């Protein structure tokens, strides 16, 4: 975790990481430039460098359970031809700092002249399934 994130109001973006990437993306990834520095951002028809703004972000705090969790609405890359092994959620308001790296698993995801949607899990009871949860 890095200081300076206001997930409820900052602009969060999602950039796709190409298949057969050369870098390693995990908890040590600190910035969107980690992906671009390795030339690992996905490309293709109608995919723009930097990705897209995330879906609506909702931050919930539960004082009795001493937890906070984040819900991100499903996010769509419209009418693209591209493939990706994962994605980076980053804060474009705060110096493009990385928030989370998500691996899609298997052979990744792709779209051919269609919509590519990243479907985030429903948060569940007390944020049990949230993409970001802090206790």
Image (cartoon, grey):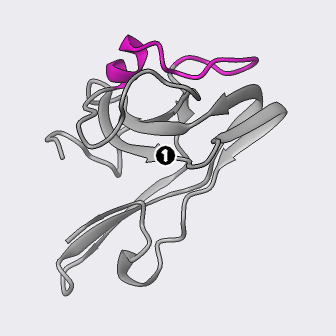
Q: Which residue bears the numbered disc 1?
A: 103
Taken as a whole, is the magenta stretch helix, strand or loop? loop
Going by the image, does 6 lie left or right of 8?
left
First to last magenta residue range:
32-49
Q: Is residue 76 above or below residue 81?
A: below
75 is higher (above) or lower (below) than 40: below
Q: Is the residue 17 above or below the residue 5 in the image?
A: above
Determine if the magenta segment contains residue 47: yes
On the image, the x and y values in percent for residue 132 come to 35, 59
Residue 96, position in %: x, y? 32, 26
Residue sitting at x 55%, y 26%: 20
- Specify the quadrant that holds the C terminus: bottom left
- Which x, y percent locates residue 58? 42, 60
- Between 47 and 34, the residue placed more toward the observer is 34
Mark 1: few/some/many CA within 10 Å (<14, 14-19, 20+): some
x 78%, y 35%: residue? 111
């Amino acid at each position: 975790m890095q200081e300076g994130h206001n997930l409820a109001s900052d602009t969060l973006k999602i950039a796709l990481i190409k298949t057969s990437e050369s870098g390693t993306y995990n908890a040590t990834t600190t910035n969107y430039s980690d992906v671009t520095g390795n030339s690992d951002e996905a490309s293709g028809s109608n995919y723009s460098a930097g990705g897209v703004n995330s879906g609506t972000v909702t931050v919930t705090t539960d004082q009795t359970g001493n937890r906070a969790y984040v819900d991100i609405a499903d996010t769509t890359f419209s009418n693209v031809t591209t493939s990706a092994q994962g994605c980076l959620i980053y804060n474009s308001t705060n110096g493009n700092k990385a928030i989370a790296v998500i691996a899609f698993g298997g052979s990744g995801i792709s779209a051919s002249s269609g919509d590519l949607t990243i479907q985030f899990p429903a948060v569940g009871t007390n944020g049990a399934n949230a993409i970001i949860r802090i206790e």
